Image (spheres, rainbow, N blue to C red):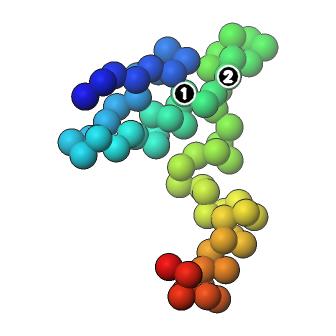
Amino acid sequence: MNSLTIANVAISQNESGLYSLNDLHRASGHYDEDGAWVVDPSKRPGSWADQDRAKRLITELEFDASIL
């Protein structure tokens, strides 16, 4: 497997070659005014279903399961 690093964060892969969403989330952060690395909690992998866009997608998929 090739190694991937974004913003000095190593992005790990599992045995199937899938990238870690947690690592990608960590890499999506930025430095605040004090120089600390911060990550927007609304962008956590576990909170994607709380976003309006995801809720609309879920509703549409539930409404028309034939598109799957």
The answer to which image quadrant residue 4 occupies is: top left
Q: Determine the image quadrant of residue 35.
A: top right
Q: Quadrant of residue 65?
A: bottom right
Residue drawn at point x = 49 percent, y = 15 percent? 8
Q: Dot 1: what SS? A: helix
Q: Which mark is residue 30?
A: 2
Dot 2: element: strand
Q: Residues within 10 Å of mark 1 (few under 14, many from 20)?
A: some
Q: Position of residue 20 (x, y in %)?
A: 40, 40
Left/right of residue 44 with respect to residue 8 in the rendered view: right
What residue type is disc 1 on? Ala
Percent of width and height locating residue 64: 61, 88
Q: Residue furthest left?
A: 15
**Label 1 belongs to which residue?**
27
Judged from this view, the residue extending furthest toward the top is 35
Q: Nearer the viewer, residue 47 or 63?
A: 63
